[in-house]
Image (cartoon, grey):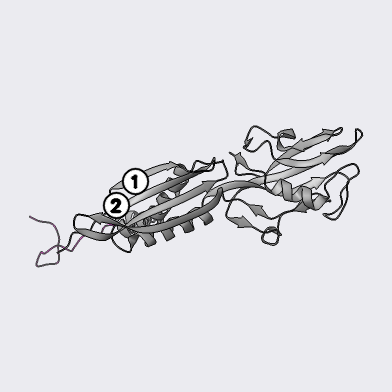
Amino acid sequence: METFILPSRLNWEPGTKPNEATFVIEPCYFGYGTTLGNALRRVLLSSLPGAAATAVRIEGAAHEFSAISHVQEDVIQILLNVKQLRMKISSDEPITLTLNAKGKREVTAADIDAPGEVEIVNPALHIATLTHRDAELRMEITARRGRGYSTTESRGHERHPLGTMSIDAVFTPIRNVGFRVENTRVGDITNYDRLTLTVETDGTIRPEDAVRDAAQMVIDHFRLIIEPPVPVEPEVPAAPESETTTEMIASEPTVLPPDDAPNGGGEVS
């Protein structure tokens, strides 16, 4: 019978972009290159945790169609810029970030005052342009951790102060995933698969760590089949002994059997 070949080589090299890498997995049994590529791509795009802004409150702006004095961008453009904010958050609770900028200048993500649980990885991100020396921009940004893509409708249960504008949140740290499958040789057989996977992240996680985490998620889902849990029989507590029954038994008099004498008993001479 033909030996079932498992992948034995994994090579990776940096891509053409700052947070991009290419992974080559070979040799794969024919057909398994596509199977592995689809599984890793789906998990990478949908399941890795990340952080994003979910709501913004801008002083002087009641809604997204407002205009702010001496600010070149309208509120909609500012919200779109904030959506591109990439960060690492170590807390599972929502975090509030503040931004206070004055004077004629460009406002970037570096102007955001973030607590210790937050690390902004793209501080050069453009937020707004103040066009006058008397211009002032104040805002509060709510951010939290999550997975995948979250719309404002799916977070309708959240409560925010008056004037807060909810925004769609892109939590996934993966910007792009692509793969291709080519033939590779194993001995005399030339139709085994070589899987080439290209991953680009937003800078909050390294591509090699992202692929490793995605592979671990797939393994964890199959672990239930490989190692099914052993059912545990619930312990039935022993019924406590009734004190009343014990007392009744102890208080009953002892009845002795009658004598076996022919006359029904009497003194023995």
Identify the residue under disc 2.
7
- The residue depicted at 80 percent of the width and 46 percent of the height is 57
Q: Main secondary structure of the magenta part?
A: loop
Span colored in magenta: 253-269
Q: Is residue 164 above or below residue 135?
A: below
**Label 1 crowd bin: few (<14), some (14–19), many (20+), radius 10 Å:** few
The answer to whether the residue labelled 1 contacts the one labelled 2, judged by CB atoms less than 8 Å apart, is yes
Q: Nearer the viewer, residue 95 or 59?
A: 59
- The residue depicted at 23 percent of the width and 55 percent of the height is 186
Q: Nearer the viewer, residue 92 or 236?
A: 92
Tell me if residue 243 is in the magenta stretch: no
Disc 1 residue type (three-letter)? Leu
Identify the residue under disc 1.
10
In whole angstroms, how far apart are the C-alphas of marks 1 and 2? 8 Å
Tell me if residue 258 is in the magenta stretch: yes
- The residue depicted at 78 percent of the width and 50 percent of the height is 77
